[in-house]
Amino acid sequence: MIQLYIPLNFLGVIYREIKQSLTDLDKMFVLMDKEREVADAPGAPALAGLDAPTVRFDDVHFAYDPARPILQGLSFEIPAGKTVAVVGPSGSGKSTLARLLYRFYDIQQGAIRIAGQDIRSVTQASLRRAIGIVPQDTVLFNDTVAYNIAYGRTDATQAEIEAAARAARIHDFIAGTPKGYATMVGERGLKLSGGEKQRVAIARTLLKNPPILIFDEATSALDSANERAIQAELQSAAQGKTTLLIAHRLSTVVDAHEILVMEAGRIIERGTHAALLAQGGRYASMWALQQSDPSA
Ligand code: ATP
């Protein structure tokens, strides 16, 4: 009993940490079947209509702990192929939106729909195939660069892996290492910088080519050249995909179809960049602050 309990408990801790950072979930779900907090409805079909899906949050209420409501009646739509950006102070609930769309947790009231289907009514496997996540902090496997890029698409050819790496502008870096795509990375291999890891995550997502994207922008400061480059890569990856962008720097959100400004689990302002600036409210003052202090 004790022997069983300790490793399961240990895995549980890892699982929760990983869930928090939105990474490598499919693998952990397989390992941690018992830890699932959501389940497929009996006879649930696969998610359909994925050519150009619309994502809708309808009056979503959610709490991790019943005593502490986090989201309190949130509604918005990401039209097919468009980007909706979410900004707001730390703890306002931005990453929670991403976790709910990927169905790490079920909501308590309201509905989240993709192409008109409640995500609770379809299989989790089909839901997760349809969504690509570029998390804040990418955790790499202790394996080769090629494995890390192809993760989730085991049938990918070397040419496809390289094409994705080129698009994410990490190919030259990889090609410059002695073993190229066979270079081991991760804790016991080549250590990659935050920007390089994020590029590997972008390459992985490009290769998976899902119709829906979630970008959880890194909070850690990249140097400004790296930041501009990552932004350009994110924009090209998001082209034509239905995208939820959780942003920490307002420069990333300027072109979004709609920007949601969150505070304490509610949307306090919404609109395009220009409309929000003209409104002269919270977003406009956040923008003014970041213009005067780019690290803010
Ligand atoms: P940041 O910009 O710092 O990433 P955020 O806006 O993304 O913040 P969330 O991570 O969505 O914020 O967190 C919203 C609230 O939910 C916070 O008050 C946080 O403490 C709480 N929270 C997040 N994860 C959990 C969890 N697993 N269990 C309980 N509470 C949580």
Image (tube, rainbow, N blue to C red):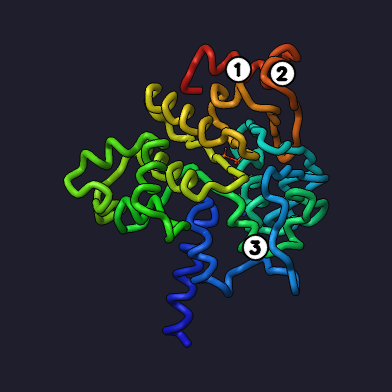
Percent position of residue 95, x then y: 60, 44
The numbered mark at residue 276 is 2
> Is residue 212 left or right of 59 when viewed as pictured?
left
Residue at 62 percent across and 23 percent down: it is 255
**Looking at the image, is 250 positioned above or below residue 171?**
above
For the residues labelled 3 and 1, the Cα–Cα distance comes to: 38 Å
- Secondary structure under the numbered disc 3 in the rendered image: helix
Residue that mark 3 sits on = 124
For residue 226, what is the image quadrant? top left
> Is residue 158 left or right of 57 when viewed as pictured?
left
Name the one closer to the observer, 11 or 31: 31
Q: Which of marks 3 and 2 is nearer the N terminus?
A: 3
> Is residue 263 left or right of 108 when viewed as pictured?
left
For the residues labelled 2 and 1, the Cα–Cα distance comes to: 10 Å
Tag 3 and tag 2, C-beta contact below 8 Å? no
- Secondary structure under the numbered disc 1 in the rendered image: helix
Residue at 59 percent across and 13 percent down: it is 288
- Secondary structure under the numbered disc 2 in the rendered image: helix
Residue at 38 percent across and 22 percent down: it is 225
Q: How busy is the neighbourhood of tag 2: few (under 14 within 10 Å), some, or many (20 plus)?
A: many
Q: Which amino acid does label 3 sit on?
A: Gln
The numbered mark at residue 287 is 1
**Looking at the image, is 230 positioned above or below residue 35?**
above
Tag 2 and tag 1, C-beta contact below 8 Å? yes
Residue at 69 percent across and 15 percent down: it is 274
Q: Which amino acid does label 2 sit on?
A: Leu
Percent position of residue 256, x then y: 64, 27
Percent position of residue 186, x then y: 31, 53
The label nearer to you, 2 versus 1, is 2
Q: How busy is the neighbourhood of tag 1: few (under 14 within 10 Å), some, or many (20 plus)?
A: some
For the residues labelled 3 and 2, the Cα–Cα distance comes to: 36 Å
